[in-house]
Image (tube, coloured by chain):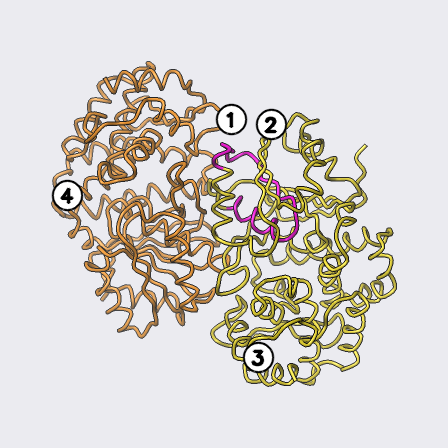
Chain colours: A yellow, B orange
């Protein structure tokens, strides 16, 4: 009955789990959970947008399977990833008398997944949790790999835990309710996988972009390929001591821009990543590492997807270069004062450079803001 | 130069660490850290009592070793283990620009160790930390084994993480500045190790109690034997899926009493554990599991140490039996509605009983409150 188009296994030993990808998995979650985790109760964490669009589908399935649950609904938006909301979720799970063996369900995009996963990590010193990502960004990136957390006034995701889910259910139909801007923002992370080390995937995206945006079969294939890519990286380097840092391509610039725009609607996370990836390619070109034509191809592809690609594309006025540099320096990837960036030798040839001179970054930013 | 009387190794693979026990380790911490963790910076978390008594000794050694540090000082007391203080410590570590490779130092008793360890666990998704326990309770129990956390309005230690320290420095001289009540409260946890599975240790304590309280050589030996015991248990069951739960002997009753007295000066943690251990023995006797004379020996020994042993010893009025039962039911050790208790067949013969009827506990409590 349950239609599962793709299964990606994340082979992390005793923390191993499956990512299931299919067209109606939210409706089928109750049956799937009842079979995989008999006798558990559930704490569902979601936001008010997703609650309206998807929650009834989930709870209908849980009811049909006879599973008990409580629902905690939060305001939508990046601003929810803060200490007060974390406390609200943890206290809500405790008030619902969920026990160590019970499960938290994160039903939503990256914000809900990060926050609910972190709450699961610290409630009773660790509850199990299930990701049901409803945005493209969450399906291809944030729901996989166990990074959970909230934002600090000092920067994004600076507070959190590595806590792997027990299962990820990526329901492709949830993507149908996203507006084009949200979908495009998630698409930036799709493109990222090609740019890191898979030029064939980038070429495939160039061919299938329209089909992915319109919801054809290429959409599910793209989600599956991204999850498989991410799973490979996470298996190799779960705690980001090495190669996992490549997944931060475009994120150091991106995080600084998100912080500068107040994590607001002015710049979605994926939009910051899109600009950040273009900047990473241009900066690599500037350092003589990569051919300029590759930066051009990246920018053209992201533009076709409707994404911003330059600092000038961000509405409103950006803060000073000093402010941006301070945000870059506070990034988690800083080690002993030197800046670590993901640079590239061209499309599909990203690498970690741990010794970037802050002056070079500053000069580059000054030039790009024009 | 550095005098180390005992070394206990906690063999947890890549999370392995040493517990060093000696007479002046706070003064020598700078030299020890400089040798073991070259090139790191430090975030010291302490409380205002310990800051007055011990902080200058620590910072003098760090200064002499040329190590950089920031100090975050919190109010003393169990009330500090809350969300707001956690946020304060995490934000303080971020504001100090401590990086992933830097170290948090918890200088204080169990409250500081639990809170600072938890802050280290979630700052930048995990910083290393060093425990410098200054209370007997922290030296023999809470600084070893990686349980960190804060309290919830729903109960004690319900929010937290398993996060092992990189090193524990137990300075015996720090115990000289404890008042007798604090020392006795820690001593309850010492006795616990004998009661769990080491009747010879309990006999040894009966002989050496006075020497331990007066600061003779038996004090250091007692600390080392407790740490070795705890290390054995933690190695066998790091995440408390089994045998580690034995360390909760006396804690289910104890936590309920602490909650009922508002985590206040009315009842210190170790005092709650002392009463809880006597209740666990009496309850086991009542169930026909243990000889009554053992409960008598436990009570007599704890009384000699100056500890409370009955509900009537708690100043003020206790809440209703319903309130106490609700606190017991919210304990982390509850599984699927049945109550899990650590019961005993006699001194040194504790065991985990996962199927205790709430009615039996209620009737027992009703009788004991008289």
Q: Which mark is residue B336?
A: 1
Neighbourhood count class around disc 2 (C-alpha, 10 Å): few under 14, some 14–19, many 20 upward: some
- Choose the circle earlier in sequence order: 3 or 2: 2
| Chain hosting mark 1 | B
Helix, strand or loop status at disc 3: strand
**Residues at marks 1 and 2 touching, judged by CB atoms closer than 8 Å:** yes
Question: In the picture provided, is A327 more to the left or to the right than B313?
Answer: right
Q: Quadrant of the N terminus of chain B?
A: bottom left
N-terminal-most mark, 4 or 1: 4
Name the image quarter holding the C terminus of chain B.
top left
Q: Are marks 1 and 3 in contact (CB under 8 Å)?
A: no
Q: CA distance from mark 1 to mark 2?
A: 9 Å
Q: Is residue A109 magenta?
A: yes
What is the distance, in whole Å, between disc 4 and disc 3 at their CAs? 56 Å
Q: Chain of mark 2?
A: A
Residue at image mark 4: B180
* Same subunit, tags 2 and 4: no
Callouts 3 and 2 on one subunit: yes
C-alpha distance separating marks 3 and 2: 52 Å
Residue interval drawn in magenta: A94-121
Q: Which mark is residue A356?
A: 3
- Give the labeled residue for mark 2: A39
Across and down, in percent, residue B250 comes to: 31, 30
């Amino acid at each position: 009955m349950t239609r599962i188009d793709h299964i990606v296994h994340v082979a992390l030993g005793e923390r191993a789990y499956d990512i299931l990808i299919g067209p109606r998995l939210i409706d089928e979650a109750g049956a799937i959970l009842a079979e995989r985790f008999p006798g558990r109760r559930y704490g569902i964490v979601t936001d008010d947008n997703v609650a309206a669009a998807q929650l009834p589908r989930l709870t209908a399935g849980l009811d049909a399977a006879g599973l008990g649950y409580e629902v905690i609904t939060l305001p939508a938006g990046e601003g929810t990833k803060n200490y007060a909301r974390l406390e609200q979720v943890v206290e809500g799970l405790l008030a619902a008398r969920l026990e160590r063996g019970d499960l938290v369900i994160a039903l939503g995009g990256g914000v809900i997944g990060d926050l609910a996963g972190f709450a699961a990590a610290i409630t009773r010193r660790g509850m199990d949790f299930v990701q049901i990502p409803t945005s493209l960004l969450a399906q291809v990136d944030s729901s996989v790999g166990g990074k959970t957390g909230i934002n600090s006034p000092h920067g994004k995701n600076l507070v959190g835990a590595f806590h792997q889910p027990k299962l990820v259910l990526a329901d492709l139909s949830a993507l149908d309710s996203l507006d084009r801007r949200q979908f495009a923002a998630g698409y930036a992370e799709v493109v990222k996988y090609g740019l890191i080390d898979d030029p064939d995937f980038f070429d495939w995206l160039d061919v299938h972009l329209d089909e992915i945006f319109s919801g054809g079969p290429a959409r599910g294939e793209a989600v599956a390929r991204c999850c498989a890519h991410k799973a490979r990286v996470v298996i190799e380097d779960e705690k980001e001591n090495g190669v996992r840092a490549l997944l931060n391509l475009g994120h150091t610039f991106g995080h600084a821009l998100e912080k500068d725009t107040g994590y607001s609607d002015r710049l979605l996370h994926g939009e910051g990543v899109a600009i950040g990836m273009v900047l990473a390619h241009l900066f690599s070109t500037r350092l003589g590492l990569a051919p300029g034509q590759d930066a051009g191809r990246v920018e053209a592809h992201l533009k076709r997807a409707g994404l911003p690609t330059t600092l000038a594309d961000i509405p409103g006025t950006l803060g000073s270069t000093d402010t941006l540099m301070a945000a870059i320096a506070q990034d988690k990837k800083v080690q002993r004062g030197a800046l670590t960036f993901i640079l590239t030798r061209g499309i599909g040839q990203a690498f970690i450079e741990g010794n970037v001179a802050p002056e070079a970054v500053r000069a580059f930013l000054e030039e790009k803001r024009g």
